[in-house]
Amino acid sequence: MKTNLEGITNKLKDNNIRLSHQRLKVLEYLDRHRIHPTVEQIYHGLNEEIPTLSKTTIYNTLNKLIEAGLVKVITIEDNEARYDINTDFHGHFKCRTCEKGLDGFRIYTRDMYFSGICPRCSEQEKCKDS
Amino acid sequence: MKTNLEGITNKLKDNNIRLSHQRLKVLEYLDRHRIHPTVEQIYHGLNEEIPTLSKTTIYNTLNKLIEAGLVKVITIEDNEARYDINTDFHGHFKCRTCEKGLDGFRIYTRDMYFSGICPRCSEQEKCKDS
DNA sequence: TGCTTACTTGTAATCATTTCAATTTTATTA
DNA sequence: TAATAAAATTGAAATGATTACAAGTAAGCA
């Protein structure tokens, strides 16, 4: 649950991602607003503090963070992607009536998604290493 | 796994969805191509048989079928939605290298999504019924 | 068969996301 | 600390999936 930003900045360094002002602010925002915010929400949330902030920067930052495995993207049943700093395995529930929600519910649909590397690509990777 | 189209057409009738030629063809396509096709794929797959078919119709049909619970939409890590006639609970695996895949894999990310009705909306629904 | 209603179609609009080129910042080296 | 190279930021423009809309067409029922 808890994410220490110090650990994250270290990971950024490990991944050769520069610690720009904007990137740190986006991370901080995700850490403080654990509601799976959209780019729009992040943009407005940081607008006062960084009036020059561009949405493109937010997109770039999030894509970098996803690549590094520090952030997860949620793209279920919405035309807008949502971003989650909690990369642990956990479920997401959405009420189809009020479109909000979390605990205690009647479930109509369940979906599991896995991302990883398949055996064939695994094998080829081994060859490359040696 | 198996889906009998007869049962589906009956369900369409139950849901007051008219059994148009186009709708039945889209359903048949989904039944025969269980690879989570995109709208683009359905469109090209049916183009020869129905040259006048419009993408809008495919979108309309799919949305109706989703509403009726006969089809599920998959929107993970792609800008294009994919559609699945198998509405049973089952996992989806995608290889992050070759972008295909199914069985036997090294997993990096896992995601569970639930859709249903939360307690508050459940309660309000009860009130409406009585 | 005729009638009402809903569906289909193609075009145009919408809107999230990406591309791109110019500018600015970061991190490094002297 | 100043100079430098590489990478990040910015905003405008492009992209592309999806939806809105209005006119024509087909489905289902009497």
Image (tube, coloured by chain):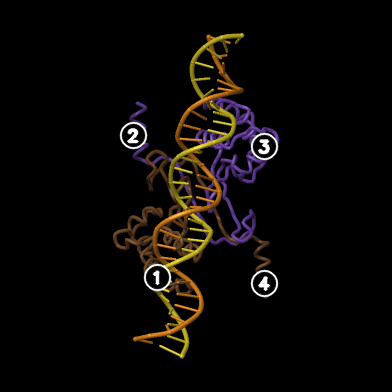
Chain colours: A brown, B purple, C yellow, D orange
Dot 1 falls on a residue whose secondary structure is loop
Q: Are marks 2 and 4 in contact (CB under 8 Å)?
A: no
Q: Position of residue A73 (x, y in %)?
A: 47, 56
- Where residue A13 sits, quadrant-wise, is bottom left
Above-or-below relation of B84 to C3:
below
Q: How far apart are the alpha carbons under marks 2 and 4? A: 59 Å
The chain that hosts pointer 3 is: B
* Mark 2 crowdedness (10 Å alpha carbons): few <14, some 14-19, many ≥20: few
- Which residue position holds label 1? A20
User: Do discs 1 and 4 share a chain?
Assistant: yes
- Which residue position holds label 3? B47
Above-or-below relation of A19 to A60:
below
Q: Amino acid at mark 4?
A: Lys
Dot 2 falls on a residue whose secondary structure is helix
> Who's the residue at 33% across and 30% down the image?
B127
- Which residue position holds label 2? B124
Q: How far apart are the alpha carbons under marks 1 and 4? A: 34 Å
> Who's the residue at 45% across and 61% down the image?
A62
| Residue A76 showing in the rendered view | yes
* Mark 4 crowdedness (10 Å alpha carbons): few <14, some 14-19, many ≥20: few
Q: How many marks?
A: 4
* Mark 1 crowdedness (10 Å alpha carbons): few <14, some 14-19, many ≥20: few
Q: Position of residue A59 (x, y in %)?
A: 45, 59
Q: Amino acid at mark 2?
A: Gln
